[in-house]
Image (cartoon, rainbow, N blue to C red):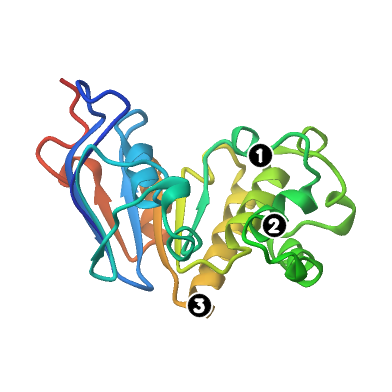
Amino acid sequence: MLELRAITAGYDRNSPVVRDASLTIAQGEAVGLFGPSGCGKSTLARVAALLHRPDFGTLLLDGEPVRRWRHRAPRALRTAFGVVFQQPRLSADPRLRLTDLIAEPLRATGRREEMGERVPELAATVGLTPDLLGRRPHEVSDGQLQRACLARALVLRPRWLICDEMTAMLDASTTAALVTVVEEYRSSTGAGLLAVGHDRVLLRRWCDRTADWESLAPAAGNRP
């Protein structure tokens, strides 16, 4: 179980982006978080993925409160989450070939021995042909790069996936392909999913249930 309880977070304590927001995701459940651009969804998603420490509130994983964030979180917690961001070009190192981009988490966690098998396997899963793996981000399309970013998010076999506007910049066919990959992964592993977006129709089709941003808490997303 992933629980966010009364989360207040932002980048300036005097002007929080998220205030008193609560959300629960069961293991194996797909929850969509719907809301307009700029309301604070991405900040809450970063809190859920342990990438941003909240100012107030509690995040619990399997009933245990999380006390450390980002690189200070225990490895077992950090590797439990896979994250795909909205803009792949901002989340990918432009110097890396796609094969190295996918393998980044394996290198960071000392599991280089898995690269030879895991990277080609995931590349095929997300629809990247072998000739694309030697290219760098500027040599591929947004859709191809986002496929690589999804493969990177899955490479450590996370228990939780956070997809923050993953398909916002993609065409319909690429969107369908990536959603299918996520759903097949969830089906085979029992991973939980938080899918953030402003496309209500997509979220309703994709997820078990959808939470509207305004319903998370009376003050959620309201800027002072």
- The residue located at (38%, 39%) in the rendering is 42
In this rendered view, identify the residue nearer to me: 126 or 56. Answer: 56
Labels 3 & 2 near each other (Cβ < 8 A)? no
Mark closest to the chain's N terminus, 3 or 2? 2
Above or below for 8 versus 208: above
- The residue located at (29%, 53%) in the rendering is 67
Is label 3 in a helix, a strand or a loop? helix
Above or below for 167 versus 188: above
Mark closest to the chain's N terminus, 3 or 1? 1
Please name the amino acid that badge 2 sits on. Arg
Residue 207, percent from left and from top? 38, 62
The outermost residue toward the right is: 131
Q: Quadrant of the C terminus?
A: top left
Q: Alpha-carbon distance for marks 3 and 2? A: 23 Å
The outermost residue toward the left is: 218
Is label 2 in a helix, a strand or a loop? helix
- Residue, disc 2: 107
- Residue, disc 1: 92
Q: Quadrant of the N terminus?
A: bottom left
Residue 152, percent from left and from top? 64, 55
Q: Residues within 10 Å of mark 1 (few under 14, many from 20)?
A: many
In this rendered view, identify the residue nearer to me: 77 or 167. Answer: 77
- Residue, disc 3: 189
Q: Nearer the viewer, mark 2 or mark 1?
A: 2
Q: Nearer the viewer, mark 3 or mark 2?
A: 2
State left or right for residue 54 relative to residue 215: right
State left or right for residue 163 relative to residue 152: left
Please name the amino acid that badge 3 sits on. Thr
Above or below for 136 versus 177: above
- The residue located at (72%, 46%) in the rendering is 144
